[in-house]
Image (cartoon, rainbow, N blue to C red):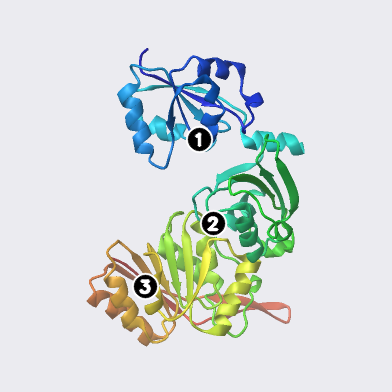
Amino acid sequence: MGNKLYIIGIGPGDKDYIYPAANKLIEASDVLIGGRRNLDLFLHLNKEEVVISNKLADIERYILEHISKKKMVVLASGDPGVFSISEYLKNRLVDVELLVYPGISSLQYLCAKININWADIFISSLHGRELNNLTDIVKNHGKVMFFTGGTSTPVQVCRDLAANGLGKVMVTIGEKLSYPEERIVTGSAEEVAKMQFDSLSIMLVEYLGQGLAPQEVWEMATPGIPDDLFVRGTVPMTKEEIRTVTLAKLRLRDNFVVYDIGAGTGSVAIECGLIVKKGRVYAIEKEPEALALIRENLLKLGPGNVTVVAGQAPEILLELPKPDRIFIGGTGGQMDSILDWAAEMSQNIRIVVNAIAIETAYEALAGLENRGFRDIDITCVSVAKGRLAGKKHLMQAQNPIYIISAEK
């Protein structure tokens, strides 16, 4: 028989959507491998069954032990090329020849039902995953198809969208597609959040900038959101030019976890969130006015991967995932305690401290040196902004800022 494993897409659920070629292979097989619902479609064939559970290593072991003796077929829901077990098997069974037969995915089925083209749809799975970058994904792609499951239900997704200012986006939910109890519902995220759906569903989210004025959506690839786009209040804010240099000193990657300690208006946290699209940013602040401003700016400008944390560092940091990068814009007098905590981190981290006072700059510099940080760099940035004086422009100096960076 050779080392051949057949992976067959069986469509959205109803047997009528399985291709004739796939049916022939299934009928000729010795063993069927799949989820319980998929196997139930072929009980009449009286085949040997292997049920796929959470222990995929057991499936891998079974296949390797029997591949040369039995003709095996893996039943994949929908199409094997869309969030299926086939990728796992391809990476694990390197000496097995995988023969993949396509199926009709639930994505194709839903798009056909509502008569839309899916060529420009971004596809993402939330099954068993946190909703970290949800609103960011929606804003960046416009049309997104989410496969839901586990705790990431359609209702929870819609609640998260609404909580982040996207309650007006149009959502279409496909539940139990191709089955007699099939249900397709379209409405705003706010409306759908009040309904109930099966956890294993598919949902299309269409975002066209609803509810946001064009100037409030920062769509540039470069950092440096203009200061006047932020809600300011009386809370100090890291200004546009300083913020841009600070981001460069942080040296971010798209999957990093970033802390913004003393987040103020949230300007640095928001810019970090736009860069670390697959990561997470924690805006840490203790002042009530600043916390309100951060939340307001997040609704206006922010990506969906920024979490506001109310409390004093370093105590509040113990509850958070370990960071890759730490920006310190304000310490509330706790510089030494924060640096002590950072120095004890088991993983490599990079810290950037912004200071306006010479004493604060010295405290940060000495604190980093005394705690064994390396590659310490200090830069003083002075910015002058032009302003109109009659018909002429004058340059008005802003306070110089010390930007100190180091690694451990």
Asked if labels 2 and 1 touch by Cβ distance under 8 angstroms, the answer is no
- Circle 1: residue type: Arg
Q: What residue type is labelled 2?
A: Leu
Numbered disc 3: secondary structure: helix
Whether residue 192 is situated above or below residue 182 in the rendered picture: below
Circle 2 Cα neighbour tier, 10 Å, few/some/many (<14 / 14–19 / ≥20): some
The image quarter containing residue 353 is bottom left
Residue 267 picture quarter: bottom right
Where is residue 216 drawn, in percent x and y?
68, 65
Q: Is mark 1 on a helix, strand or loop?
A: helix
Query: Residue at left 36%, top 26%?
Result: 63
- For marks 3 and 2, give the CA distance: 22 Å
Q: Which of 337 and 9 is in front in this view?
A: 9
Q: In this view, does 93 lie to the left or right of 246?
A: left
Residue 243, image x, y percentages: 50, 69
Disc 3 marks which residue?
Answer: 318
Locate residue 402 relative to residue 40 in the image: left or right: left
Q: Can residue 21 be seen in this view?
A: yes
Crowd band around label 1 with a 10 angstrom C-alpha radius: few (<14), some (14–19), many (20+): few
Residue under numbered circle 1: 36
Where the C terminus falls, by quadrant? bottom left
Q: What residue type is labelled 3?
A: Leu
In the rendered image, which residue does mark 2 sit on? 131
Please tell me whether residue 108 is drawn above or below residue 152 in the rendered image.
above
Question: What is the CA distance from the residue labelled 3 to the residue labelled 1?
Answer: 42 Å
